[in-house]
Amino acid sequence: MKDKWYADNRDLIKWSVLINLAQNHQAKRILQIAYFRPCEFSNIEIEDRLLKLPKEVISHFRDIRNITEMHTDFHIDVLYEEFKDREKYQKAIVEYISSYPEEKCIVFLDPDTGLQPQKSKLGLEHVSNGEVREIWEHIKKGDIFVFYQHQTNRNGRPWVDEKQEQLSKAANIPVVSVKIAHGRSIAKDVVFFYAVKA
């Protein structure tokens, strides 16, 4: 997740879905796997001088770790390690989710776009099918797996069912076990898939 997109309308949906799921399933902790990639922010101009955005402004409005300060009945933690090496990051994810063996958790994968495309190159904005499978295998029974998926096309063709099926195959679970949450009246280009580990 690039920091420049933090706190947009999709985050309103994202965190509303996560909080409701945590409450409904009595989860004690939300583990956000942020797939964090920092951005270079544009400059501002004052009297023809180019100036960088103050660190305090960026920290207040675009630091994804700010979510951990939300007042809830459960804990929110963010895997904030920068995502640039897939293999290293995948190992960090497995270690991170394994460090909470006693608590029921929501394990939330939050890439920029979602699952790897079927017909084009895997990029840092995606999670691969194999990575999903490995993460699913490492979460414990009773945990809730949540996955951010952005719209995969702009031509109006249906895309949600295709990605739901791809996720079920990647995790090796029945497609009926993969539920969908969204907020179409706020942002219609995003859904959240979730499944409870049985």
Image (cartoon, rainbow, N blue to C red):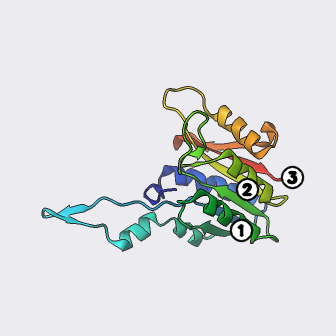
Q: Residue at x 24, y 61 (%)?
A: 44
Question: Which residue is identified by label 2?
Answer: 135
Instruction: Find residue 140 and report its horizontal and vertical position in percent.
Output: 82, 61
Q: Is residue 28 left or right of residue 152?
A: right
Instruction: Find residue 65 and report its horizontal and vertical position in percent.
Output: 54, 69
**Circle 2 residues within 10 Å: few <14, some 14–19, many ≥20:** some
Q: Is residue 69 left or right of residue 100?
A: left
Q: Secondary structure at mark 2?
A: helix
**Residue situated in front as seen by the camera: 152 or 105:** 152
Q: Amino acid at mark 2?
A: Ile
Q: Residue at x 41, y 60 (%)?
A: 39
Foreground mark, 3 or 1? Answer: 1
Q: Secondary structure at mark 1?
A: helix
Q: Amino acid at mark 1?
A: Glu
Q: Earlier in the sequence, mark 2 or mark 3?
A: 2
Q: Residue at x 86, y 52 (%)?
A: 198
Instruction: Find residue 102 and report its horizontal and vertical position in percent.
Output: 82, 71
Q: Amino acid at mark 3?
A: Ala
Q: Earlier in the sequence, mark 1 or mark 2?
A: 1
Q: Secondary structure at mark 3?
A: loop
Question: Which residue is identified by label 1?
Answer: 95
